[in-house]
Image: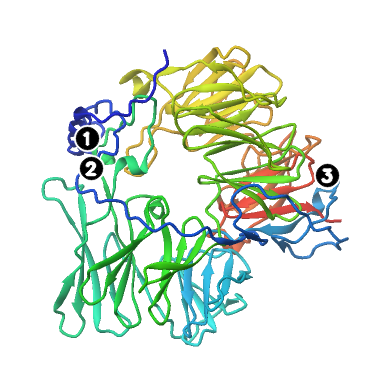
């Protein structure tokens, strides 16, 4: 019998939660917590409703990688500009510019000619600002600035790339608009000239228009209105009975007399446990030896700004105790005269990254975490411009079987792009994807369990079925392309015929004794699946670091590996799951953190041995060249901005590619690498934002 996650609320769950909140964080002293069933939106104490926002219109889109696209939401026919004969590229081109159609296959004989030929992307939004005259506004990432005409923002912005990636938290203009301060509160800030974006060295005698302020410490922030008449002060207080429950006190004072003018009346925004974590297993929702791991996370002022006249006040709220704090970042706009809440902007499902007032105080320039740029008219409480000009950090990317397309996965979004110029072909809402190894077909899984298979050459639907009763976690095509396997939050792993969409068979459910046997026989989710080439094995990775091997033809479990669990109890971490998971090139070994497992026999091999030939600062795994002679791996540690090119046989270093300039190693690093199936293009993804494209340049 299949065990599905229990969805109904229970009085026992609520009682258990209150008990857990009283437990001390010392694991040795903490009593075991009971099994928790998933609640049905049961609010935690002091929880306030998630802020909502009017649905914006479908944006007119300028593709974040360079091409202009209008309302790209599904398939559109791919178009390619004929590529001219190009001279060897001295500097990389940007998205939308054609690359050579034919490029040499990368190998030992020509790897010394491997060069960065393109940089695709604009990155994630970091800062926004208006010029002092209000005629122009800019939206910045760590890689450059998009410059807009404020009168005609619908026109494509001008992209101004930085000389190198820059880390910063706030963006401010100088009074004369000639320079921009990229402020880093923890390290020396960077100044760039405007409008060319070049780094300016040395000390400058410049007056910066710091129109907003960031928090100074946990929940504490002070900022004066631009006319100097008012001061915003925020502090933190706690519930007397439950210390973990925090509240934000936000007061406005007269700057001349220090008299309290008013206090913002709205309740503190609380992020509940279920809003920041998904279930760990089919029936065991979560367990932690630390009681406060279940406490709500209070949102405190992160950034605050007054309008020029002081008529309104905007506060961006974030929970400081969460590492992914910007995923719960919402904006609230108040009446500057009495503190009345006028309206919220953004939500937990569509968080705001940053904002800035226009000089006249009537418009808010908004940058969202997902890359959306928006202008919000304050008097009318509505948007006047919306465009998807930037992107959210990616989760994964892969080439199509013929190397023609690059498929990019971002949170809840799948993009299909051309590898000849990086331009966008299609965008889909989806939680999972897999690419056929024999055709340009893409399988897409959704939040409601729907499974669609599309031909992204012509946009036709191969099939569209209700594959699961809940969210689809992962999808995988078989090596011959005839079968497709799906895993969902309904705890089912199913096999499908890729031509008809007909159900073939289940893969067996599995259960483990979670948390060293504290919770016996707990059914597991499967979060990742992959076929092992050349075998009849399907590999799955699931709850509590469990590894499963199934027979592809029957669906029977062949082995079950219960890996050593890593107990974590931090309030913001997805507890008890590895931070690193990779398969080797042949699919024989699985690496979980620093442990290796033989997938053929289902045996733990122990610690990953350190090869004496592996150069310092080079990772062990990565894509291989088409002939198998070269191994491309990420640089790690002090070499995190590099790609190591190794001899695949003995791992000696052949060369290093300096993808990220040394001066930017604190600002960006190489995250993922992929080699095209044709073997002629290597892509390094930097910091989840930019694609650095490498090809042979004779």
**Residue 690 placement: quadrant:** bottom right
509 vs 604, nearest the viewer: 509
Q: CA distance from mark 3 to mark 1?
A: 58 Å
Residue annotated with mark 2: 44
In the figure, is residue 245 to the left or right of 36? left
Residue 162 visible in image: yes
Q: Earlier in the sequence, mark 2 or mark 1?
A: 1
Q: Earlier in the sequence, mark 3 or mark 2?
A: 2
Residue annotated with mark 3: 105
Q: Where residue 498 sits: x, y (%)?
A: 66, 26
Mark 2 neighbour density, 10 Å: few (under 14) some (14–19) many (20 or more)? some
The N terminus sits in image quarter: top left
447 vs 509, nearest the viewer: 447
Tell me whether the residue at label 2 lies in contact with that at label 1, contact meaning CB atoms closer than 8 angstroms: yes
643 vs 541, nearest the viewer: 541
Instruction: Say if 690 sits above or below 342 in the image.
Output: above
Q: Where residue 190 sits: x, y (%)?
A: 51, 72
Q: How many marks?
A: 3
Q: Callout 1: helix, strand or loop? A: helix
Mark 3 neighbour density, 10 Å: few (under 14) some (14–19) many (20 or more)? some
Residue annotated with mark 1: 17
Q: Where residue 442 sits: x, y (%)?
A: 65, 37
């Amino acid at each position: 019998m299949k065990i599905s996650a229990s969805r109904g609320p229970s009085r026992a769950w609520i009682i258990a939660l209150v008990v857990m909140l009283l437990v001390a964080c010392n694991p040795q002293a903490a009593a075991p917590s009971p099994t928790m069933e998933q609640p049905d939106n049961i609010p935690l104490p002091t929880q306030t409703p998630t802020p909502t926002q009017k649905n914006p219109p479908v944006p007119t889109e300028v593709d974040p990688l360079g091409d202009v696209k209008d309302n790209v939401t599904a398939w559109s026919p791919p178009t390619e500009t004929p590529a001219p004969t190009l001279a060897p590229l001295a500097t990389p081109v940007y998205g939308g510019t054609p690359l050579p159609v034919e490029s040499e296959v990368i190998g030992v004989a020509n790897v010394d000619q491997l060069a960065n030929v393109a940089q695709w992307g604009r990155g994630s939004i970091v800062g926004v600002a208006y010029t002092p005259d209000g005629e122009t506004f800019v939206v910045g990432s760590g890689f450059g600035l998009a410059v807009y005409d404020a009168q005609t923002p619908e026109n494509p912005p001008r992209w101004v790339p930085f000389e190198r990636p820059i880390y910063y938290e706030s963006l401010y203009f100088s009074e004369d608009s000639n320079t921009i301060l990229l402020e880093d509160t923890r390290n020396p800030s960077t100044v760039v000239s405007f409008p060319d974006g070049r780094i300016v060295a040395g000390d400058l005698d410049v007056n910066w228009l710091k129109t907003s302020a960031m928090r100074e410490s946990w929940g504490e922030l002070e900022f004066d209105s631009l006319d100097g008449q008012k001061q915003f002060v925020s502090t933190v207080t706690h519930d007397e009975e439950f210390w973990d429950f925090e509240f934000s006190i936000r007061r406005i004072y007269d700057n001349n007399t220090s008299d309290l003018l008013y206090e913002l009346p709205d309740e503190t925004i609380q992020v509940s446990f279920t809003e920041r974590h998904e279930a760990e297993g089919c029936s065991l929702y979560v367990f932690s030896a630390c009681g406060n791991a279940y406490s709500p996370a209070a949102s405190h002022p992160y950034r605050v700004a007054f309008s020029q006249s002081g008529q309104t006040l905007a506060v961006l709220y974030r929970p400081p105790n969460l590492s992914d704090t910007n995923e719960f970042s919402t904006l609230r706009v108040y009446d500057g005269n009495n503190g009345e809440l006028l309206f919220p902007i953004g939500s937990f499902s569509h968080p705001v990254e940053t904002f800035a007032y226009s000089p006249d105080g009537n418009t808010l320039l908004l940058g969202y975490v997902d890359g959306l740029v928006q202008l919000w008219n304050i008097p009318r409480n509505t948007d006047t411009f919306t465009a998807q000009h930037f992107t959210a950090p990616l989760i994964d990317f892969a080439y199509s079987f013929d190397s023609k397309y690059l498929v990019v996965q971002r949170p809840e979004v799948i993009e299909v792009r051309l590898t000849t110029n990086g331009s966008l072909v299609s965008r889909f809402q989806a939680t999972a994807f897999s690419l056929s190894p024999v055709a340009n077909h893409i399988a897409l899984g959704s939040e409601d369990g729907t499974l669609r298979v599309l031909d992204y050459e012509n946009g036709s639907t191969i099939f569209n079925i209700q594959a699961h009763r809940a969210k689809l976690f992962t999808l995988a095509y078989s090596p011959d392309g005839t079968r497709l396997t799906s895993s969902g939050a309904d705890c089912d792993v199913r096999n499908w015929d890729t031509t008809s969409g007909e159900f073939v068979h289940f893969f067996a459910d599995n259960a483990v004794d979670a948390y060293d046997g504290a919770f016996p026989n707990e059914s597991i989710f499967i979060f990742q699946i992959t076929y092992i080439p050349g075998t009849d094995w399907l590999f799955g990775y699931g709850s509590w670091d469990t590894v499963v091997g199934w027979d592809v033809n029957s669906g029977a479990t062949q082995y079950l590996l219960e890996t050593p669990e890593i107990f974590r109890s931090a309030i913001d971490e997805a507890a008890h799951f590895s931070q690193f998971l990779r398969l080797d090139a042949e699919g024989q070994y699985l690496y979980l953190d620093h442990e290796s497992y033989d997938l053929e026999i289902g045996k733990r091999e122990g610690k990953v041995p350190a090869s004496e030939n592996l150069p310092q600062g080079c990772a062990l795994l990565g894509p291989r060249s088409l002939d198998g002679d070269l191994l491309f791996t990420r640089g790690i540690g002090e070499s995190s901005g590099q790609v190591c090119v190794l001899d695949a046989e003995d791992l000696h270093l052949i060369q290093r590619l300096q993808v990220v300039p040394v001066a930017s190693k604190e600002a960006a690093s190489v995250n993922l690498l992929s080699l095209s199936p044709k073997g002629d293009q290597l892509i390094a993804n930097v910091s989840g934002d930019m694609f650095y494209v490498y090809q042979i340049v004779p």
